[in-house]
């Protein structure tokens, strides 16, 4: 895949812009992520099925908490209905290794965006084939590539969803974006939980473009860097 240096510049500059965003924000969900109907599932990451995304997958656990006030409430999901996995799912008779993906267009306003994720037993995430880090330990601000259920449970054994790194710069830099999750189960129950949301504000400082950051916001150094990239890619 050919990398676009202008897209990379937008990502780097976007992160700096969001660090200075106003504090007056409200959270809204990402319906493209929260609605299971927008996902596809696969056993090998090659052959994908919309019909294999089973939402409301049976499980005795309490669904993890994501964020409140959602228009679309996320539900547990897993692979079922294709490749011989038919009949009645019990929550423990599905495949042990699955892939999920969804694709959506950039948002009009580029405020910070995250996923809350959890899985039985573990998962990794990519956005446009780039690993997305997960905040595994908020107390120490430790990020990692892999969510592991046994390391993210409360005192009652219920799962704790973890927040990913902010990927709003990707939403600014053009799209569509593909979110891909690889999940594993080592036995017993299996499920995946994904809750997407972003921040918005009553009076945004700027409207995010779909491909390049506004030149007025770059400053002299950023503008010079971007113009240098333009010369190199022409």
Image (cartoon, grey):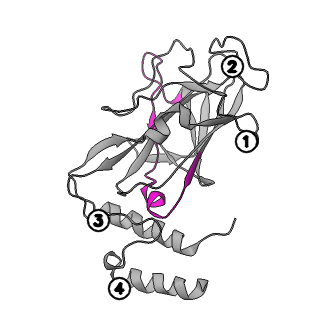
Query: Within 10 angstroms of label 3, few (less than 14), some, or many (20 or more) residues?
Result: few
Figure quadrant of the N terminus: bottom right
- Residue at disc 2, secondary structure: loop
The residue under label 1 is 45
Q: Where residue 35 appears, x then y in whole percent? A: 49, 33
Q: Nearer the viewer, residue 36 or 44?
A: 36
Looking at the image, is mark 1 or mark 2 earlier in the sequence? Answer: 1
Tell me the residue that label 2 is attached to: 187
Query: Label 4 crowding class (10 Å Cα cut-off): few <14, some 14-19, many 20+?
Result: few
- Please state which of residues 36 and 43 is positioned toward the viewer in this rendering: 36
Disc 4 secondary structure class: helix
C-alpha distance separating marks 2 and 3: 48 Å
Identify the residue position indicated by label 3 in the image: 206
- Mark 1 and 2 residues: CB-CB less than 8 Å, in contact? no
Residue neighbourhood size for the residue with mark 1, other residues' Cα within 10 Å, grouped as few (<14), some (14–19), many (≥20): some
**Does the segment drawn in magenta span residue 51?**
no
């Amino acid at each position: 895949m050919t990398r676009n240096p202008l897209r990379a510049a937008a990502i780097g500059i976007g992160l700096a812009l969001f660090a200075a965003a106003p504090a007056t924000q409200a959270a809204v969900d990402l319906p493209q992520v929260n609605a299971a109907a927008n996902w596809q599932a696969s056993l090998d990451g090659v052959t994908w099925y919309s019909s294999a995304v089973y939402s409301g997958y049976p499980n005795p656990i309490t669904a993890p908490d994501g964020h409140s006030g959602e228009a679309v409430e996320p539900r547990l999901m897993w692979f079922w209905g294709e490749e011989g996995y038919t009949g009645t799912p019990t929550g423990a008779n599905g495949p042990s290794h699955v892939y999920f993906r969804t694709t959506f267009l950039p948002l009009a306003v580029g405020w910070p965006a995250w996923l809350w994720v959890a899985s039985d037993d573990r998962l990794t995430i990519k956005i446009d084939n780039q690993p997305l880090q997960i905040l595994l330990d908020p107390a120490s601000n430790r990020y990692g590539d892999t969510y592991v259920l046994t390391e993210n449970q409360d005192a009652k054994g219920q799962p704790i969803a973890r927040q990913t790194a902010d990927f709003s710069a990707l939403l600014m830099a053009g799209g569509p974006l593909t979110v891909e999750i690889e999940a594993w189960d080592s036995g017993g129950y299996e499920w995946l939980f994904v809750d997407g949301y972003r921040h918005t504000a009553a009076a945004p400082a700027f409207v995010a473009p779909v491909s390049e950051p506004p030149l007025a916001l770059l400053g002299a150094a950023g503008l010079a860097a971007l113009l240098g990239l333009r010369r190199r890619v022409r």
